[in-house]
Amino acid sequence: MVTSVEQFAKLGLDIDQRLATAGRVPSSVRKGVVVFASVTEPGWTADDAYEWVAGLFPAPIPHLDAYVVTGAAPDIAAKLDAYHVGATIVAAAVANPSPMDMAPELLAAWSSR
């Protein structure tokens, strides 16, 4: 699992080199990333989001906080945009048991960038 934008960018460069070695044009492959995102608000904290994401996996994940972007919607949108350094496709998986309650605020902040 990738734990940072910088690590993701390095991985993208490695993929590009492997593609070139294999005789493929690196831009012929679209790279993407899915990031867990959770808007924190009264009644839903970053720890709640980490616990919710942890429940998706059968084994404990060390440093789970590195895999979940939390905070105010505009801050999350900026962090998601940063992944475009290595990806042409960036998707957010809303880390909340009621994603449709949180998604409009996050989408509004992300689409306004």
Image (spheres, rainbow, N blue to C red):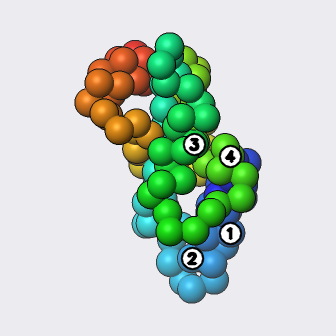
Please tell me which residue lies in front, 54 or 95. Answer: 54
Image quarter where the N terminus lies is: bottom right
Please tell me which residue lies in front, 12 or 46. Answer: 46
Secondary structure type for disc 2: helix
Q: Amino acid at mark 3?
A: Tyr
99 up-or-down from 19: above or below? above
How far is the residue under mark 3 from the one under mark 2? 35 Å
Residue at (61% x, 48% y) in the render: 67
Q: Amino acid at mark 2?
A: Leu
The label number, if any, that marks residue 66 in the structure image: 4
Specify few, some or many for label 1: CA neighbours under 10 Å numbering under 14, 14-19, or 20 or more.
few
Please tell me which residue lies in front, 5 or 65. Answer: 65
Q: Is residue 9 left or right of residue 110?
A: right
Secondary structure type for disc 4: helix
Instruction: Give the mark nearer the N terminus: 2 vs 1.
Output: 1
How far is the residue under mark 4 from the one under mark 2? 28 Å
The label number, if any, that marks residue 113 in the structure image: none
81 up-or-down from 60: above or below? above
What is the x, y in percent for residue 65? 67, 44
Q: Nearer the viewer, mark 1 or mark 4?
A: 4
Instruction: Give the mark nearer the N terminus: 3 vs 2.
Output: 2
Name the residue carrying label 1: 14
Residue at (56% x, 26% y) in the render: 45
Name the residue carrying label 2: 19
Instruction: Give the mark nearer the N terminus: 3 vs 1.
Output: 1
What is the x, y in percent for residue 112? 40, 16
